[in-house]
Image (cartoon, grey):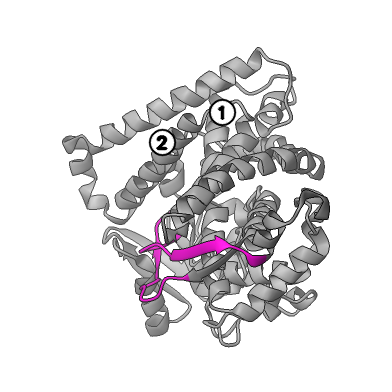
Amino acid sequence: MAQNPVPVLSTYLKLYGDTFRFYLGGLKEAIVTTDPAVIQHVLKTNAENYRKSEIQVRRMGHFLGKGLLTTHGEPWKTQRRLIQKGFDRKQLDALSSIMQDSLTESIREFDRRIQDGPVDIYPQLMEMTFAMVARSLFGARLKREDIDLVSHTICTVQEFIVRQTLQPYLNPWFAASGELKKHEDMRVRADNVLLEYIKERRLQPPGSDLLQSLMDARYADGEGMSDELVLSESMQLLVAGHETSSNGLSWLLYLLSTRPDCLERVRDEFDSVLGDTLLSHGDVMKFPYTTQVIQEALRLYPPFWMIDRMAVNDDQIGDVAIPAGSMVIVYVYGAHHASRAWDDPEEFQPERFVKGSEKLRTPFTYLPFGGGPRVCIGNQYAMLQILMILSTLLRRYDFDLVPGQNIVERAMVILRPKNGIQMRFTRAAVVERQAAAPANAL
């Protein structure tokens, strides 16, 4: 379980059916389910009875503060209403230019790195998406070294949280050995960097980034968020906002490298819609086939591979009894690979998601961004980010997998490629032709 929970839980599904009980870390009883009826009941129908588990409320809250990811009840509802405005159509239109500027900077660095040979696309895409989310939040003034510091802190702390969760018997040792304090000190350094940006922005003219949306938000009494709360929400948006896209893109490029026919169709769609222009939020709905490909990649490799909840009161759904205090694990990866919900579930088949197919699917069998009232607030931002980066990479480069790799998933907080994904990138033939053409011919 500590090394990789996915094959363990998937084996239990085959042995015990779509809902079973087991002990997380050998200590905490949990109910694991891929049953869409149980999932819908927990995440939507009776959502008021299910709160975020201590994994998120206590452990993640310890490092990330009290924000949208780590609160529940009325405080969560209030914060959700305030922050939702930062992801509406108008705001995403405004963010498009910030995101493209960040991507342009990242691509310059990527161009230099691929000259030295194959690259692991996972950390490359992590850097791209993190810089993009950081600039979307804090604007162009956020320094690259500060982005790198916060990114490293988040990744390191997340790995530590997973260890605390899957190996709870080690928690006394983490405290006694100084491991806990080491990670707390890392968090404080990152917090101080971002808090300084927030304090500076209070004194500057309004911007068009997400930080401005957070600072402008007002409660019913007219008061705004404190600097500390703005920091917590910013940090949690950074955590949730970059890894979903970077992991989705990593698996997507891997899948496309194995399917040249799909790759060409996606490229053709980008070319026909965009030509030589850059993608913006207004273009998102213009790529039906590419959207199918993205949705299928998120089915096979869902970034949020599980969703955990804690029952407040005793509950019953069908023949499944859920005592108060029980942890319920919605095993998203298992639901996405269930043969009762999907034909040939291990196969990459984008046509599953042709427009209108969602009406034929059983609800709560597809959960790439969660479900119910706590569905991911930034799902539209994530789709914009994935399309923006994908359109740039596919029109700029040809790429192929380095042979002989063992590409498997590892379930941390997010479903990552365990050993990375090594790829070779070269400038696409059409790009090379354009670069060599006289200026008046372009």
* Nearer the observer, 313 or 172: 172
Q: Residue placed at 68% from the left, 15% from the top?
A: 204
Mark 2 is on which residue type? Phe
Q: Residue placed at 67% from the left, 35% from the top?
A: 78
Instruction: Examine the rendering and report whether any part of residue 246 can be seen.
Output: yes
Residue placed under numbered mark 1 in the picture:
142
**Farthest residue, direction front:** 438
Which quadrant would residue 152 be assigned to in this image?
top left
Q: Is residue 50 left or right of residue 362?
A: left
Please provide percent x and percent y for residue 263.
64, 73
Q: Is residue 377 left or right of residue 325?
A: right
* Nearer the observer, 19 or 60: 60
* Nearer the observer, 401 or 199: 401
Residue placed under numbered mark 2 in the picture:
63
Q: Is residue 259 left or right of residue 148?
A: right
Region rendered in magenta: 401-429
Q: Please check the rendered image and state whether residue 411 is part of the magenta-colored stretch, yes or no.
A: yes
How packed is label 1: few (under 14 Cα within 10 Å), some, or many (20 or more)? some
Instruction: Examine the rendering and report whether any part of residue 301 can be seen.
Output: no
Mark 1 is on which residue type? Leu
Q: Earlier in the sequence, mark 1 or mark 2?
A: 2
Quadrant containing the N terminus in the rendered view: bottom left
Which quadrant would residue 430 be assigned to in this image?
bottom right
In the displayed structure, 321 sits above or below 349; it is above
Please provide percent x and percent y for residue 74.
63, 38
In the displayed structure, 253 sits above or below 154; it is below
Per the model, the C-alpha gap separating discs 1 and 2 is 22 Å
> Which numbered marker is on residue 362?
none
Please provide percent x and percent y for residue 279.
75, 52
